[in-house]
Image: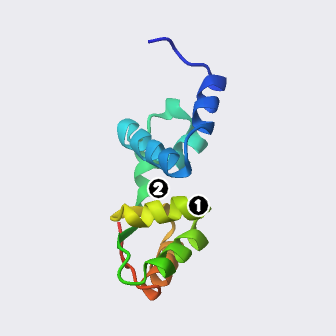
Amino acid sequence: MAKLTNDELIEAFKELTIIELSEFVKQFEETFEVTAAAVAVAGPAAGGGDAAAEEEKDSFDVVLESAGEKKIAVIKEVRALTSLGLKEAKDLVDAAPKAVLEGANKETAEKAKAQLEEAGATVTLK
């Protein structure tokens, strides 16, 4: 397989939806055992290590377990919490359980959880 240039990678990413890009980032993090924040700060040569372990201690994923009976209200909250469009937010809610926010700090994660639960969703923090 030929090595892709940075420009070719950027062009490929432009064709992805936000959800597809989010899933790619998650898979990248799992494959290389790093977080996107650690890669941005340390660069890929750092290899993860202690910086990634410290980063994960104070970061949380807000996972939508189910939309409940008020699906429209939950979709509106997902759109308010993310930069997703209507279709992407609906797809995320339909695909539950699914992460709404990844790598959020504790305060942001708890606030998002409260907003989603108020809208009628079942949410967990991981």
Q: Amino acid at mark 1?
A: Leu
Q: Amino acid at mark 2?
A: Glu
Q: Give the distance between the C-alpha atoms of the residues marked 2 and 1, in whole angstroms.
A: 25 Å
Residue indicated by mark 2: 55
Figure quadrant of the N terminus: top left
Give the residue furthest to the right. Answer: 7
Q: Position of residue 75 (x, y in %)?
A: 50, 73
Q: Which mark is residue 42?
A: none
Q: Position of residue 33 (x, y in %)?
A: 38, 41
Residue indicated by mark 1: 84
Residue 11 location, quadrant: top right
Question: Which residue is located at x 56 percent, y 35 percent?
Answer: 43
Q: Which is in the foreground here, disc 2 or disc 1?
A: 1
Check the image and report above or below for 96 versus 15.
Answer: below
Question: Which residue is located at x 39 percent, y 65 percent?
Answer: 94
Mark 1 residue element: loop
- Could you tell whether 99 is left or right of 79 in the image? left
Check the image and report above or below for 120 versus 64.
Answer: below
